[in-house]
Amino acid sequence: MAVFTQEEKEFFMREALKEAQRSLQKEEIPIGCVIVKDGQIIGRGHNAREELNQAIMHAEIMAINEANSQEGNWRLLDSTLFVTIEPCVMCSGAIGLARIPNVIYGAPNQKFGGAGSLYDILTDERLNHRVEVETGLLAEECAAIMQDFFRQGRERRKEAKRLAKLQAEGELSD
């Protein structure tokens, strides 16, 4: 695995958290990602499925696409991917296909995790490319942004139901 100090790892994860904030501002599931090579960010991404109306526009996919363009190569050797939430199965597959050797993620993804929680694609010895994985970096911060997003969504839906009910009652009394 690439050698980073704890301070460097936290710096890059905070950059991924900034990407997650970009998703949050667009009411997307707030996951952010950066890809680092030689101490420089070569790719950034955030969830943009709703914005772009494309199911595959996950943070990791966006960051991989940008890094491929930046490097002029589909292979992202000697790089490290930092992502706020454990990559899903699709993104884990893309990470392997891009030959990214190192992944550091913040919080686990108990429902869709492809890097340890449900599946372990990144380290599966049956595959021709295996990835060094580090988990738990700034996990509380990475989990909190997701928890806040889903809590606020539940609150918005509850308020919308309440308003719809009031409106329906108002229409009935007219």
Image (cartoon, helix red, strand yellow):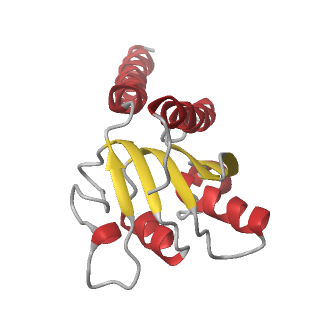
x 49%, y 31%: residue? 10
Residue 134 seen in this snapshot? yes
Q: Position of residue 157 (x, y in %)?
A: 39, 29
Q: Is residue 115 left or right of residue 44?
A: left
Q: Quadrant of the C terminus?
A: top left
The quarter holding residue 138 reads top left
Looking at this view, is 38 or 126 the one in front? 38
Vertical comparison of 22 with 81: above or below: above
x 56%, y 39%: residue? 16
Q: Position of residue 111 (x, y in %)?
A: 25, 52
Q: Quadrant of the N terminus?
A: bottom left
Looking at this view, is 152 or 68 the one in front? 68
Vertical comparison of 109 with 151: above or below: below
Q: Position of residue 20 (x, y in %)?
A: 55, 36
The quarter holding residue 63 reads bottom right
Q: Position of residue 65 (x, y in %)?
A: 67, 65
x 44%, y 32%: residue? 6
x 59%, y 69%: residue? 77
Looking at this view, is 133 or 121 the one in front? 133
Vertical comparison of 75 with 56: above or below: below
